[in-house]
Structures are given as structure tokens and as C-alpha cells.
Image (cartoon, rainbow, N blue to C red):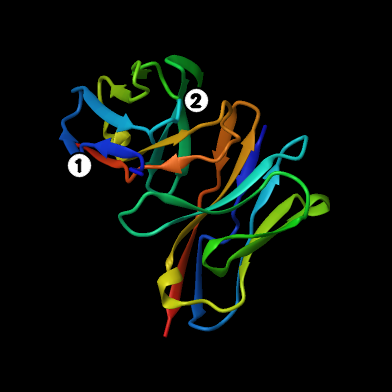
Amino acid sequence: EAGVTQSPTHLIKTRGQQATLRCSPISGHTSVYWYQQALGLGLQFLLWYDEGEERNRGNFPPRFSGRQFPNYSSELNVNALELEDSALYLCASSDGRAPADEQFFGPGTRLTVL
Amino acid sequence: AQSVTQPDIHITVSEGASLELRCNYSYGATPYLFWYVQSPGQGLQLLLKYFSGDTLVQGIKGFEAEFKRSQSSFNLRKPSVHWSDAAEYFCAVGAGNQFYFGTGTSLTVIP
């Protein structure tokens, strides 16, 4: 069974540009979570999607947004990139209906903002 | 506000020695508790989890963790560390509609 996949592996952008990150959950999982892992800050919860709806978001500005498609894959969009957006962005999926359920993580997308 | 604290940023142990990684949480009720491991360049892998019941939980790779309600702790232990255990370890709490991670403990294993 394939795990959570993310693309691209690496992404380099300049300040002010937009970045789009993609995530495919494990087959059968309906919930997708996005996290930002910045150096020294651990993992910060960004967004939670379930059944195509945004269920919750962390303490991030509105320029961080996303969506979930009918096949449960998801996109994370970051507009007006800032230098401090440079981080590893991790996607996770679960078959539960709450973030408290076990989450399975992808390898991440490394975003570098120059 | 809910929080997860991992007080040790970095730990170094000798191969074969025992290991304990500390985790404390702040939450009004008993949350769901997890330990994840992240090897270099890899995503996070679940080591073990606690939802309810027996407060000593066994996980993969020989790890175990004990939930202590009175101390709001969920410390991770391994009796004998292997060189392949060198990685970043994250404690996490599932509470309500959110999932909180600690800042991680980096483990170095010396031969």
C-alpha cells in the first residue's frame, strides 16, 4: 500500500511569489493535515481538511490556504512568500475524523524562499 | 492553552545504554498521546500511542512510554539504544480539533 506522497520534493521561490505544494493521502483516508516544520520551531499545525472541507486551521495568516479535491488529495498554497516561510512542509493523512487519530506522514516538501 | 514540552533539545547516549526522552503536556483532560521519530530526510513515523487503558504502552523498535497523569508526562524509554536510533523524536498531543507537537529531541548515539 502506497504511503502519503508529496510533490515537489524541493521548491525554490523568491520573496513575493506564490508556492503550491501537493499531497496525496493514503488510499481510503479522507483527512489531510498540513504542518510547517521550521528550523528550531518543531511542527506547527497549519490546516486540516476532511471530506473536502476545511475543518480547522492553525495560527497562520490568510496567505496560507489550501483545498482538498474530490479524490481527497490536497494542495497547500502560500501567497506573497516571505523569507520566514522557508521550511519543511509536511502532509499527513488519517482515516479518522479528528486530528487526535493516528496520522501518517509524507516525506515533506522543502520550500526555500530567497 | 494546550502545549507540549520536550525539555531536552539534544541528548547523546552510548550504544547499548538506556534512553529516556521526556515529554510534558498541558491540557485540561487526558489527551491522546503520541511519539513520532523522524530520521534525516524522512517523514515522521509513529512509534507508539496512548489513548486509554494501560498506562505503559509498547511501540515499535523496542520503545515504550509511560503515561503519568499526576505529572502530565508521557516519557519515552528504550532499554538498549542502537546506532540506528539516532534521529529526531517528537512527542505529540491530540486534543479536540488540533494536534500539537513538541519541539523535538535530537538523539545522537555514539559507538
In the displayed structure, would residue B81 be above or below residue A65? below
Same chain shared by disc 2 and disc 1: yes
Residue at 57% across, 26% down? A97
10 Å crowding of disc 1: few (<14), some (14-19), many (20+): few
Residue at 19% across, 37% down? A11
Q: Secondary structure at mark 2?
A: loop
Q: Position of residue A28 (x, y in %)?
A: 43, 30
Q: Position of residue B59 (x, y in %)?
A: 59, 60
Quadrant in the picture for the C terminus of chain B: bottom left
| Left or right of A50 in this view: A7 | left
Which residue position is annotated with label 1? A10
* First in sequence: mark 2 vs mark 1: 1
**Mark 1: which amino acid?**
His
- Towards the viewer: A75 or B72: A75
Answer with the quarter of the image where residue B17 lies: bottom right
> How far is the residue under mark 2 from the one under mark 1?
24 Å
Which residue position is annotated with label 2? A59
Q: On residue A84, which mark appears?
A: none
| Left or right of B35 in this view: A64 | left
- Towards the viewer: A80 or B24: B24
10 Å crowding of disc 2: few (<14), some (14-19), many (20+): few
Give the chain letter at badge 2: A
In the displayed structure, would residue A107 be above or below residue A57? below
- Towards the viewer: B99 or A92: A92
Give the chain letter at badge 1: A
Task: Please give the count of numbered marks on the rendered protein.
Answer: 2
Q: Position of residue A52 (x, y in %)?
A: 42, 15
**Mark 2: which amino acid?**
Asn
Q: Secondary structure at mark 1?
A: strand
In the displayed structure, would residue B46 be above or below residue A74? below
Residue at 30% across, 55% down? B41
Quadrant in the picture for the N terminus of chain B: top right
